[in-house]
Image (cartoon, grey):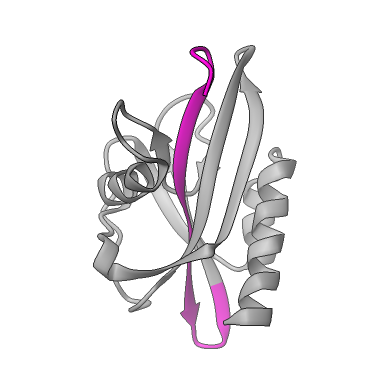
Amino acid sequence: MSAKEKVAAGFVIFRRFGKEIQYLLLQTSYGQHHWTPPKGHVDPGESELQTALRETEEEAGLKQEDFIMYRNFQRTLNYEVQGKPKRVVYWLSELKDPNTPIKLSDEHIDFKWLNLALALNYVEKYKDFQQVLNEAESFIKSNL
């Protein structure tokens, strides 16, 4: 990681609701109120996975025991934010109980559980994250 590169980490969280696979997206309370999975910046001395776990609990109220992590599904996105490089690492995880409540932090104003088609629509400005969602769906259907 270069001194100028920002690094963040989070989870693409899904649940099985009946026969439907649904993804958790949170709507930010800042900027253009975009939709994103739970994620956040890596703190000094913290691993990317520790960050993903901490941020998921802070932003959505989900603890590690609430979901199953699939460490063999990891995706890294590299892009620029305000002219500075940013790297975001995502792991896939499945909510154990589809009725587990989401408890939003003040960083977000809403959340939705969305099937793939709707989730892709909500993140349409972020083609690289759309690809992550498509790959997650394929992984789930092929392996889980």
- State the image coordinates of residue 135 (x, y, percent, origin top left): 70, 62
Q: Position of residue 112 (x, y in %)?
A: 46, 58
Q: Residue at x 49, y 80 (%)?
A: 16
Instruction: Name the residue rendered at 64%, 46% in the picture.
Output: 123
Judge left or right: residue 105 versus residue 34.
left
- Is 38 located above or below residue 66 in the figure? above
Q: Is 70 part of what is drawn in magenta?
A: no
For this view, does 51 lie left or right of residue 26?
left
Q: Nearer the viewer, residue 78 or 121?
A: 78
In the image, residue 73 lies at what x, y percent? 57, 62
The residue at the point 66 percent across, 80 percent down is: 141
Q: Is residue 115 left or right of residue 11?
A: right
Based on the displayed image, in which of its 4 quarters is residue 41 positioned? top left
Instruction: Find the magenta span and give its range.
Output: 1-21
Q: Is residue 113 visible?
A: yes
Q: Nearer the viewer, residue 5 or 24?
A: 5
* Placement of the C terminus among the 4 image quadrants: bottom right
Number of labelled discs? 0
Q: Horizontal and vertical percent for residue 117?
A: 70, 64
Task: Tell which of 144 and 104 is nearer to you.
Answer: 144
Q: Main secondary structure of the magenta part?
A: strand
Identify the residue at horizontal 49%, vertical 23% (top origin).
Answer: 6
Where residue 132 sits, quadrant-wise, is bottom right
